[in-house]
Image: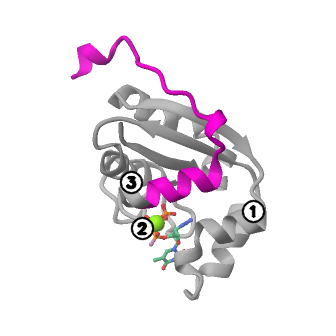
């Protein structure tokens, strides 16, 4: 079953949006298989955003991610990588569609509340970067047959 890595960023935690954000993925029908509140080391933040290391916003981005706790999560479901990105909305919250997490709660591209893996291969890399295998639990929700 497909999995994705989602991370509620420091702004989402500081603003008390953890419950609201988790609720959206739960009620959509995706399955939570791992979750932890954590302070992020500089090494992990830099590794996570490695593809952006030459961008002008990289330093500020790493500072932001290590500034305050995040909620790291793994979610499972058919098409969950793209599906989660749809619920999250466009990178810039100002242009993200209403009804998406960023469209409903954000204003600034550098404070866009949540990260979601952008492809299946990226998800595999990010899940192994953030989680140990024993921190993840596969289970079958009995409600699944009602949603599908
Ligand atoms: P992430 O889920 O955080 O990876 O965001 P997304 O994939 O939607 O967008 P990308 B392009 O990966 O942005 C990564 C982080 O960099 C921030 N950013 C991006 C800026 O601060 N300025 C910019 O001009 C761009 C393009 C937004 C993302 N994180 N935050 N916070
Ligand atoms: Mg990205």
Q: Say whether residue 1 is left or right of residue 69.
A: left
Circle 2 residues within 10 Å: few <14, some 14–19, many ≥20: some
The range drawn in magenta is 122-148
Quick check: 3 above or below 130?
above
Q: Residue at x 59, y 82 (%)?
A: 53
The verdict on residue 19 being magenta is no
Residue 147: x and y in percent read 25, 20
Q: Say whether residue 143 is left or right of residue 64.
A: left
Q: Find disc 2 in the rendering and name its residue.
A: 92
Q: Residue at x 68, y 65 (%)?
A: 45
- Identify the mark at residue 103; answer none if there is no mark: 3
Quadrant where the image shows the N terminus: top left
Q: Find disc 1 in the rendering and name its residue.
A: 66
Circle 3 residues within 10 Å: few <14, some 14–19, many ≥20: many
Select label 1 or label 3 by which is in front.
Answer: 1
| Mark 2 residue's CB less than 8 Å from ligand 1 | yes
Does residue 86 appear in this view?
Answer: yes
| Mark 3 residue's CB less than 8 Å from ligand 1 | no
Q: Earlier in the sequence, mark 2 or mark 3?
A: 2
Seen from the viewer's position, the closer of residues 107 and 7 is 7
């Amino acid at each position: 079953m497909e999995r994705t890595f989602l991370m509620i960023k420091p702004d989402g935690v500081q603003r008390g949006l953890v419950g609201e954000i988790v609720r959206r993925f739960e009620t959509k029908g995706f399955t939570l298989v791992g979750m932890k509140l954590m302070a992020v080391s500089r090494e992990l933040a830099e590794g996570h955003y490695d593809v952006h290391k030459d961008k002008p916003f990289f330093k500020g981005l790493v500072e932001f991610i290590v500034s305050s706790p995040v909620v790291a999560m793994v979610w499972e479901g058919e098409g969950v990588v793209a599906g989660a990105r749809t619920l999250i909305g466009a990178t810039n919250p100002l242009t993200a569609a209403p009804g998406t997490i960023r469209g409903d709660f954000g204003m600034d591209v550098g404070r866009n509340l949540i990260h979601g893996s952008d492809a299946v291969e990226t998800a595999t890399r990010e899940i192994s970067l953030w989680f140990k295998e024993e921190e993840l639990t596969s289970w079958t929700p009995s409600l699944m047959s009602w949603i599908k």
